[in-house]
Image (spheres, rainbow, N blue to C red):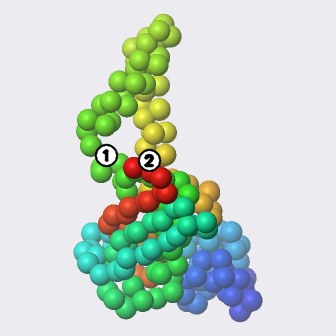
Amino acid sequence: MEITTTMVKELRALTNAGVMDCKNALAEAQGNIEEAVRILREKGLVVAARKAGREAKDGLIAAYIHHGSRIGVLLELNCETDFVARTGVFQNLAHDLAMQIAAHNPSYVRVEDIPAEVIEAEKAIYRKQVADSGKPPQVVDRIVEGKLKSYYDEVCLLRQPFIKEPEITVEQLIQNKIAELGENIVVRRFVRYELGGL
């Protein structure tokens, strides 16, 4: 099948991948755009995984003030070089992440940041909730683990559905940007202020 310039342009618009990457993915997918998107995403995740171990010491501090000036966010987003930190893609990512934090109020960046005593306290609450259900202990354990997963999805920024594309998580969004920019990207920390909050 002939891969036309129009097909390449369409795929580039969907993925932001390079011209040759799009052309090769379309050839591999025999012109099927959806299949080519999947191929590029898989390759992007492989690239992102390779870059994840690299140190990210540069970046920027993003500030976001929500409409009405009642919520504000400061976010430190790191990358490997100041060149990438100055790109529109990186700055837009920082803005989107700060907006995500303002909207969904996560408490932690990742699951590993949650103190062990907080996790144990949550487990105790969930066990108490199902204690009188009469279910066998192994079923109770599965219920507790399911509730704990939901808790992680709510309080950890990287596990939340991205507000602009709820079908992907914030972590998947960052992985896509790592693949696009060719550098490791790390959310270092954030603070969210709400008028009248503690």
Residue 186: x %, y % from top left: 35, 69
Q: Which mark is residue 47?
A: none
Q: Is residue 183 depicted above or below 99 in this figure?
A: below
User: Tag 2, which secondary structure?
Assistant: helix
Q: Which of disc 1 and disc 2 is earlier in sequence?
A: 1
Between residues 66 and 36, which one lies in front from this camera angle? 66
Q: Residue at x 33, y 64 (%)?
A: 189
Residue 110: x %, y % from top left: 36, 53
User: Tag 1, which secondary structure?
Assistant: loop
Residue 116 falls left or right of residue 192: left
Q: Is residue 166 depicted above or below 149 in this figure?
A: below
The tally of labels here is 2
Residue behind mark 1: 114
* Residue 30 appears anywhere in the view: no
Gap between marks 2 and 1 measured at Cα: 9 Å
Residue 2: x %, y % from top left: 72, 87
* Image quadrant containing the N terminus: bottom right
Residue behind mark 2: 155
Mark 1, residues whose alpha carbon is within 10 Å: few (<14), some, or many (≥20)?
some
Q: Residue at x 50, y 71 (%)?
A: 64
Q: Residue at x 37, y 66 (%)?
A: 187
Q: Is residue 39 depicted above or below 180 in this figure?
A: above
Residue 166: x %, y % from top left: 62, 57
* Residue 65 appears anywhere in the view: yes
Q: Are marks 2 and 1 in contact (CB under 8 Å)?
A: yes
Amino acid at pointer 2: Val
Q: Quadrant of residue 149?
A: top left
Q: Residue at x 39, y 49 (%)?
A: 198
